[in-house]
Image: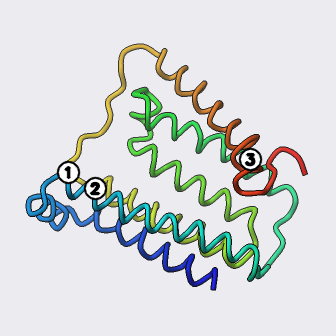
């Protein structure tokens, strides 16, 4: 049951985000609904999908775990290293910087790195479905975002102090995820066994 709820949540979340890549249909929906209502509905559908993903994955972990393969132990270290990169990209999404300008779409890049990192260290069916689906979506969204003509790309500010801020914020995000979020919310320790 958990796996089917997970898949339903992924379908809703990914379909909602795929709609954004169809720029003409999105623009028509915004014209018809108005920007505030469109964004409210987009956010609501995203939250519903996310809630179903979390609920389904939690149920799957408790009642229907299916181990397909066991990743080598060193993959854990590769995943941790990649998560530092993903955390810095999340910070770059929030703070204008040379890093943000270079990444162009840092949040999508962060999702790609996060999903790929977790595929390397999770050999269970639910994990492969979850991280694989989000990786495929993020790659598709990244490719389509590169071809958009209706959005401007980030521009690097003068100086490098924002880049230092991105690195500090990224490290803080990384440490918060590793020491607090992952062990206490996900139930899987990152830095200890």
Depth check: give the residue in front, 36 or 21: 36
Are the residues tagged 2 and 3 within 8 Å (C-beta)? no
Mark 2: give few (<14), some (14-19) or many (20+) Cα within 10 Å. Answer: few
| Residue 38 rendering spot, x and y as whole percentages | 21, 58
Q: Which residue is mark 3?
A: 80
Depth check: give the residue in front, 87 or 178: 178
Mark 1: give few (<14), some (14-19) or many (20+) Cα within 10 Å. Answer: few
Q: Earlier in the sequence, mark 2 or mark 3?
A: 2
- Write the residue at 64% across / 71% down: 57
Between label 2 and label 3, give the one nearer the viewer. 2
| Residue 67 rendering spot, x and y as whole percentages | 79, 79
Q: Earlier in the sequence, mark 3 or mark 1?
A: 1
Task: Name the side, left or right, on which 125 lies relative to 133.
Answer: right
Q: Secondary structure at mark 2?
A: helix
| Residue 177 rendering spot, x and y as whole percentages | 68, 43
- Write the residue at 17% across / 52% down: 35
Q: Secondary structure at mark 3?
A: helix
Report the Cα–Cα distance between label 2 and label 3: 34 Å
Depth check: give the residue in front, 150 or 14: 14
Q: Secondary structure at mark 1?
A: helix
Are the residues tagged 1 and 2 within 8 Å (C-beta)? yes
Report the Cα–Cα distance between label 1 and label 2: 6 Å
* Above or below for 158 versus 131: above
- Write the residue at 73% across / 73% down: 61
Q: Which residue is mark 1?
A: 36
Q: Which residue is mark 2?
A: 40
């Amino acid at each position: 049951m958990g796996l089917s709820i997970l898949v339903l949540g992924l379908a809703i979340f990914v379909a909602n985000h795929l709609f954004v890549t169809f720029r003409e249909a999105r623009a028509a929906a915004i014209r018809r609904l108005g920007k505030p209502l469109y964004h409210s509905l987009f956010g609501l559908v995203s939250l519903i999908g996310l809630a179903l993903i979390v609920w389904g994955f939690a149920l799957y972990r408790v009642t229907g775990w299916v181990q397909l393969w066991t990743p080598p132990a060193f993959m854990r270290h590769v995943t941790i290293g990649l998560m530092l990169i993903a955390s810095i990209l999340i910070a770059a999404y929030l703070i204008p910087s040379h890093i943000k300008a270079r990444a162009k779409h840092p949040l999508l890049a962060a999702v790609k790195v996060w999903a790929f990192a977790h595929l390397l260290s999770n050999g269970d069916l639910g994990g492969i479905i979850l991280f694989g689906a989000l990786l495929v979506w993020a790659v598709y969204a990244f490719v389509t975002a590169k071809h958009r003509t209706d959005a401007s790309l980030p521009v690097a500010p003068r100086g490098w102090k924002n880049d230092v801020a991105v690195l500090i914020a990224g490290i803080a995000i990384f440490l918060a995820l590793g020491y607090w979020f992952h062990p206490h919310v996900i139930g899987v320790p990152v830095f200890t066994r």
